[in-house]
Amino acid sequence: MAGKSHATPVDLPTIGKSATGIHGLDEVTGGGLPEGRPTLLCGSAGCGKTLFGMTFLYNGAADYNEPGVFLAFEEHPEDLIKNVGSLRYDIGKLIAEKKLAIDHVEIERSKISESGEYDLEGLFIRLGFAIDSIGAKRVVIDTIETLFSGLENEQLLRAELRRLFEWLKSKRVTAIITGERGDGTLTRYGLEEYVADCVILLDNRVHDQLSTRRLRIVKYRGSAHGTNEYPFIIDEKGITVMPITSSGLAHAAPTERMPTGIADLDDMLEGKGYFKGSSILLSGMAGSGKSTVAAHFADATCAAGHRCIYFAMEESPQQIVRNMRSVGINLQKWVDRKLLRFSARRPSLFGLETHLATMYRDVTEFDPTAVVIDPMSALTGAGMTGDVHSMVLRLVDFLKGRGVTALFTNLGIAAGENAATEIQVSSLMDVWLLLYNREGNGEHNRQLYLLKSRGMAHSNQVREFIMSSEGIKLREAYVGPEGVVTGSARLAQEAKDKAAALVREQAMERSSRELERKRREIAAQIEILQAQLASEDAEASLLTREGAARKDQLAADRVAMGESRRAGRPGKRPRPPMTRAATGQEPK
Amino acid sequence: MTETNGYNLRLYVAGQTPKSIAAIANLKKICEQHLPGRYEIEIIDLMKDPALAVRHQIVAIPTLIRQLPEPLKRIIGDLSNTEKVLVGLDIRPT
């Protein structure tokens, strides 16, 4: 076969790959389609075969400098150009630049009669001519099976197809041959028999009125490839294949933290917030403030200068922006600064996997640090419960792999139809925040509780959750005789506590006043005593001085007496007593 | 160039393949037999001018196209089945 003829120059141990430039497909195939070989692309009508082919050629011509030939059996070139014009593929320009050629092959059985033997050399000549005229490296043949309905001699046709594929190989072009899905076979006419190198199956299944496109690589000779079904989307941005199903558990575990946007909640998480790249589940009943917590997180992320995508499933972006103004968060300014992107889609718009693929596309495109999915539970409407689990698993893996912190809100707390999902999903989550609505005393109050937070010493406290125009505040919940009290019960408790405190304070003041008074009393007494003491002292010193004066007087008297004795009768002692008091009185 | 009821036939071949040679011979034989003096044959070798294959929508080789009289008719094959050629060219045996 022709394979032998070109086997010699290929000295690489692995086969070359030709990048398709289609988001995700190159990851799944490990680089693209087998270079220089034909690939069979099969699928039922309307699953995007032609668009795949055209995208392959367009990207090749525009991005990889590989011109391409489109051999169309079904559509006219004008129609083809128009059809992909909606994807902003400017085919006309590429044709003018000789980077792309379209040849339309028209075969109608009613206009052709057969007489004797023939071959399809005309087709080879046309294709060869087109390839040579622009130096094409890529070829798309869409859909060659049309020949089966255009020509009678099937046996001959099969022989010619075999020859065509070998010829394509010898031409060293990377080719896509599309084929219609048959009943129980990959293609209606068994093309897989001839194209054996790579077979890709496209599928568009409808479940619950929602269609989901899926891609599967049936075989890829000489290359490892993902074997699962990968969802893909076709929209105005082209084709995106969601390349992951469930990647390994090998993602890095960053120690960086992301603030939650709520200071009190940060405090509950060691004062720092969530781990970067972690997945956070936020469960709560309707009206428990899930979106508000989510918006705080988005706000904090943007305020730190990081990008964030808010996947809104239930509200329009305008409505979210308006509502968050009421709690003092201005999300619009982040949108204006291109830090925040809203991606709002009704869950029922398409199936789960399509949602997944869209999210994948948005995340790879915008490269955010954090995403918010609000609410995840809305997606149960887009698929069966089990599917939601597998989708969330894939999403979590994908986001973790990129180190994106993800906040999922979920309606309902382990009750009702979401219970199963939530229980399954919660095990994937690193942080689980519960928001309760507690009803009592004719009002309902919000409570927040950190059920788990992997890898940190988080608070175990139930906190009362208060939303105001300044945002969310978390209050220490009061534990009363009937359990935790919140709302006006807490206010009452607080008032009671305040009154008690006041009474205590007054009592204290009173006793301290009393003390002061006593102290002053004692001080006064001390003063009196000191005055007494002073007067006593004065008396004492007076007596001392009096004593001294008398001593002097006596001495003087004695001298005077002696003198008088010498004059009168010597040797007689003076008589002291009578004059003592009198002389004592007048020393001055 | 031809009379009103004349046949203008174009035979597309790709080089000198046995099928091509057979087709040319078969066509000449049929025309001589059934359309003596009323036909004109143009043989186009697509190997020499491949662009014509695109312009004239040629897939199979050999392909015979009846240009005139209108409408356009196509017969593919080496024209070995004379019956089918006559039906395909809408020639009633005289």
Image (tube, coloured by chain):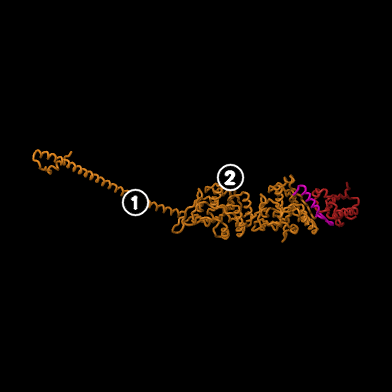
Chain colours: A orange, B red
Packing grade of label 2 (10 A; few <14, some 14-19, many >=20) is few
Mark 1 residue type:
Ser
Spot occupied by residue A106 in the image (x, y as percentages of width and height): 78, 52
Q: For this rendering, which residue is in front, A332 or A514?
A: A514
Mark 2 residue type:
Arg
Q: Let me know if residue A113 is in the magenta part.
A: yes
Magenta span of residues: A110-136
For the residues beneath circles 2 and 1, the answer to whether they share a chain is: yes
Q: Circle 1 marks a residue in which chain?
A: A
Q: Residue at x 60, y 51 (%)?
A: A344
Residue A511 is tagged as 1
State if disc 1 and disc 2 touch (CB < 8 Å).
no
Asked if residue A41 lies left or right of residue A571, the reply is right
Question: Which quadrant of the figure contains the C terminus of chain A?
Answer: top left
Q: Give the CA distance from mark 2 to mark 1.
A: 63 Å
Spot occupied by residue A321 in the image (x, y as percentages of width and height): 56, 48
Q: Circle 2 marks a residue in which chain?
A: A
Q: Which residue is mark 2?
A: A337
Q: Let me know if residue A394 is in the magenta part.
A: no
Asked if residue A352 lies left or right of residue A449, the reply is right
The answer to whether residue A381 is visible is no
